[in-house]
Amino acid sequence: MTKDTTQLQEWLRDFEAAARRPLEQRWRYSFIKTYKPVMDDAKFRAFDTMEEYRRWCEANLPRWLGYARV
């Protein structure tokens, strides 16, 4: 058996095990809370324009969050 086949079989077993779980449990496990610096530090932010929002993101958020312009 190749490494790819072994990996595929392992994924299939994991998928089948997850499919047997009750919906409530699958729903609970499907969301992972990840702290996002700056974004999670305030309850609410509002911007008058999309441009204002984009400038705020570029000035305040780490690039790895994915809010920077390309």
Image (cartoon, helix red, strand yellow):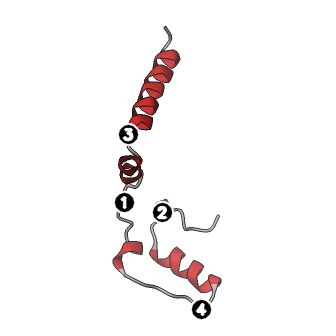
Q: Residue furthest front?
A: 22
- The residue tagged 3 is 21
| Residue 20 image offset from top left, x and y in percent | 41, 35
Cβ atoms at labels 3 and 4 below 8 Å apart: no
- The residue tagged 4 is 48
* Relative height, residue 13 to residue 70 (above, below): above
- Label 2 to label 4, Cα distance in Å? 22 Å
Which badge, 3 or 4, comes first in the chain's sequence? 3
| Amino acid type for the residue under numbered disc 1 | Thr
Residue 55 lies left or right of residue 33; in this view the side is right
Dot 3 falls on a residue whose secondary structure is loop
Where is residue 44, by image quadrant? bottom left
Dot 2 falls on a residue whose secondary structure is helix
Residue 28 lies left or right of residue 47; in this view the side is left
* Relative height, residue 67 to residue 29 (above, below): below
| Amino acid type for the residue under numbered disc 2 | Leu
| Amino acid type for the residue under numbered disc 4 | Asp
- What crowding class fits label 2: few (fewer than 14 Cα within 10 Å), some (14-19), or many (20 or more)? few
Which badge, 3 or 1, comes first in the chain's sequence? 3
- Taking the spot 37% from the left edge, 69% from the top edge, the residue there is 37
